[in-house]
Image (spheres, rainbow, N blue to C red):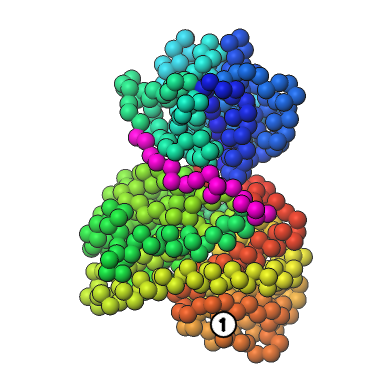
Amino acid sequence: MCGIMGYVGTKPAAPRLLEGLSRLEYRGYDSAGIALAGEREVRVFRCAGKVAELADLVAARGMGTETAGIGHTRWATHGPVTEGNAHPHRAGHVTLVHNGIIENYAALEQEMAALGRKPLSQTDTEIAAMVLDAAYGGDPVTAIRRMMEKLEGSYAMAILFDDKPGTLYAVRRGSPLVVSGNEEGTWIASDITPLLAHVRRYFVPEEGQILIATATGTVLVDAAGSVAAPRWLPIDWDDASAQKDGYPHFMLKEIMEQPQALWKTLQPRLGEDGCVSFSGDGIPSAFFRKCRRVIITACGTAMHAGLLGKIAMERMARIPVTVEIASEFRYAGPILDADTLVIVISQSGETADSLAALRLAKEKGARTLSVVNCKGSSIARESQYVLYTHAGPEIAVASTKAFSVQILALYMIADQLALGRGDYGPAQRLAWAQSLRRAEALAARTLRLAPQIKEAARELKDAENLFYIGRGMDSAMASEGSLKLKEISYIHSEAYPAGELKHGAISLVTFRVPVVAIATQESVRVKMLSNIREVRARGARVLLITREGWQPEEGLCCQVMSLPAEEDILAPFSVAVALQLLAYYTAVERGLPVDQPRNLAKSVTVE
Ligand code: AGP
């Protein structure tokens, strides 16, 4: 979603802002802009299009020598994708970029109209700029505070004042923003990806704090007007991990990285006795004790990981687990208490719906634990405990390696929840940890099937509609496979629990609607075969994703993909890789922009 950049220092700002924006492209955007603060004027460049087009525009008009500026990639929320709606927005003495949504912008627009101020764009952001300018009397901090008192909604903003050309201001509420600095100056960004090439540490301003940044450093002012100390965090991702490294797409690179990501996530949690331990994460075993039920809440792919976590936790710990879509959870009036554990799963740690669900859970007194990939993100910081996954940066919009490590993290949590059970002793714990060690090899062996999966994708590429079906864990995998295909190949697909199809949706199955049938679960194998026969009888071409050694009868399936899997519960580590590759190659066959599919954003920071 929208990306913010800011730089103030000793070097020309324009190339640094453009380079930073190109590193933020992965978040998803439709227009871009920068503003450069000079002694006499603020120069603004904007375009509806890519950062490369913006760079051409700036180069044509002159990169300039300004050493302070702000930049933005916009993901449209208010008003269409036009140059006029692109950020930065100017009002009077103020120029700003914004990520988030100003919910009361209509009321504020009327208030501004009463002062004779009219916006030029259709954005909520310009209204915020007008509110800030109306409050400005020469003291930026006072004006920003007044603006914040008026704004409702979520925002991260980087701000320039015409008469303070060497100073950058920033503020956030409910939207991400990180800050860092080196001998070249101070950097502000929506996430750490653009900082990786420059610095090894960063901090996140607390909500409500105002950041004042100059070439020599930063000052944080809290709501009471006192200077606050930043909480620095180390950066443990390197710049190379955020590069394509010879792969044609980030998505393929990230799919290929899954074995290492799984091992890096598991290894630090294996104690001396070989069993799962969260002591290195600072999560006491007592946290899981007397937990009567678990609610897992997340969005999209992370929510699908939750569906698999539910099955593992209920099987192992015998406590009820429900999985709630985060955007619904908050409005469903959930019943929560201190014996309820709410687990929030998020790769980015900034998904607004998931963050809102977490805040509600805390407010209602539930225990909270997050499973997060991005260090220091809002969800990680605000939950009671965090279990970090170690997937490294995930740049492609379609989540791949983050999904596999989320499943692994939930499987580890299942171990901790099961500790209270009398019949889950050291032998069972050790056996479980040994099973988890096999996840890495399962993913690696499935990657070797890439050429075969590529062939299968050729069969799917011209389909207009298809079904993904499965039972048990494979039903959750069907949902994930279908989502992956939809988001990057733009082919409509539906995921159905295989046994449910005959209760209605089977009317859509014809010879024109291929079916991806996932059958890796021993416990429901026979039933699943019956469901496959049902769709085959209606003419569907079936691509069967199954386990090595399971061969269906002649003529039942057009293609069979046999994956390594030794036990039902571990099958998702193979199936995930196969379904990701299937979606990837299908999108490549269709010539689509795999890493940045239309309309989508990597980090969804609005509700
Ligand atoms: C997955 O491929 C998606 N792009 C999307 O569903 C994503 O998983 C979802 O938006 C949640 O993001 P998060 O993990 O960063 O919270």
Amino acid type assigned to the residue bearing label 1 in the image: Glu
Q: Is residue 337 left or right of residue 178?
A: left
What residue range appears in magenta? 231-249
The residue lying at 68 percent from left, 70 percent from top is 451
Task: List x then y, in percent, for residue 273.
Answer: 27, 69
Task: List x then y, in percent, for residue 198.
Answer: 51, 35
Task: List x then y, in percent, for residue 545.
Answer: 60, 76
The residue lying at 68 percent from left, 82 percent from top is 557
Image: 188 above or below 580:
above
- Which of the pair 503/55 is nearer the observer? 55
Where is the N terminus found, in terms of image quarters?
Answer: top right
Magenta stretch mostly in which secondary structure? loop
The residue lying at 35 percent from left, 71 percent from top is 433
Q: Is residue 488 left or right of residue 241?
A: right
Name the residue tied to disc 1.
548
Image: 497 above or below 392:
below
Q: Is residue 268 left or right of residue 178?
A: left
Q: Quadrant of residue 113?
A: top right
Kindly state the secondary structure of the residue where label 1 is placed: loop
The residue lying at 29 percent from left, 64 percent from top is 271
